[in-house]
Image: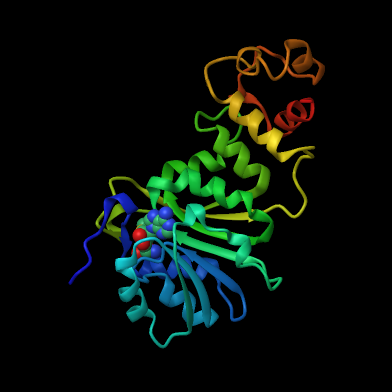
Amino acid sequence: MPHIARKRFGQNFLHDVGVIQHIVSLVGPEPGQHVVEIGPGKGALTQYLLKETGALDVIELDRDLIPLLERTCAGLGELHIHSADVLRFDFASLATDGRPLRLVGNLPYNISTPLLFHVLEKVRCVQDMHFMLQKEVVQRMAATPGDPDYGRLSVMVQYYCYVDPLFLVGPDAFSPAPKVESMVVRLVPHIEPRVQVTSTTRFAALVKQAFSQRRKTLRNTLKGLLSEDQIRAQGIDPSLRAETLTLEQFARLSNALT
Ligand code: SAM
């Protein structure tokens, strides 16, 4: 029976061979590397990744796709299929032999933001990530202070990673075609953090709170966390909005939390 794409699983399968090969060439997988693909689907990217590395871990939620995936990849190498929800998947459980993970995926767009936050939690065992996402999500990840797209996602992703938007992909590269444009992005975790933060939990909580009401000033959004005087003591004007603050200023505010 042919597989019918499921909207609830964000299924837009890549069929443009030029785009597929371009992604694989930018990843540059090599034998012996520990590559992990999120949402392999029917194996559009998987077959090329597997051919290069000889072994691959994949995480797929839709069990009906597994036989198709196995067929596409038969004879190409060792395919380790994890039939699981990536949002609950512990990436650290794969990184047990000391090799850092290289994550790749044409991601299900309906869960892209929670998925990015989930991956960031385990970023210490990751070498790099190449993801296809909705164009707007990549723009938000790469945005800088003052940009209309700058927000919690920009600050948190940039705290952990260098963000490199690679190329745009139109809807025609997929089947079914999504209603949005897509973009491939490379994320490379910083070896040394760009800013010093005494607690990443407190940093994440402060950033979340600061952007909880975008139009409001820090004086209002951070009420309960930091007083106006405490904000000022960090050299930051309490009448500013979160969308104008640099990563370094967020770090300073979060380090002032007790
Ligand atoms: N990689 C394939 C391609 O490029 O043709 C499929 C990409 S499709 C945009 C997203 C894939 O992620 C689908 O195979 C879908 O079933 C899978 N998926 C959706 N939600 C998932 C989840 N929570 N955990 C793991 N896989 C998921």
Q: Is residue 174 left or right of residue 124?
A: left
Residue 54 position in % (x across, y down): 53, 83
Q: Is residue 217 left or right of residue 168?
A: right
Quarter that holds the N terminus: bottom left
**Residue 235 falls in image quadrant:** top right
Kindly identify the residue that appears in the image at 65 percent across and 35 percent down: 204
Kindly identify the residue that appears in the image at 30 percent across and 59 percent down: 174
Kindly identify the residue that appears in the image at 73 percent across and 13 percent down: 227
Quarter that holds the C terminus: top right
Q: Between residue 85 and residue 139, name the one nearer to us.
A: 85
Q: How many marks?
A: 0
Looking at the image, is 206 positioned above or below residue 213? below
Kindly identify the residue that appears in the image at 48 percent across and 84 percent down: 77
Residue 111 position in % (x across, y down): 42, 47
Residue 101 position in % (x across, y down): 61, 66
Residue extending farthest to the bottom is: 75
Question: Which color scheme is applied?
Answer: rainbow
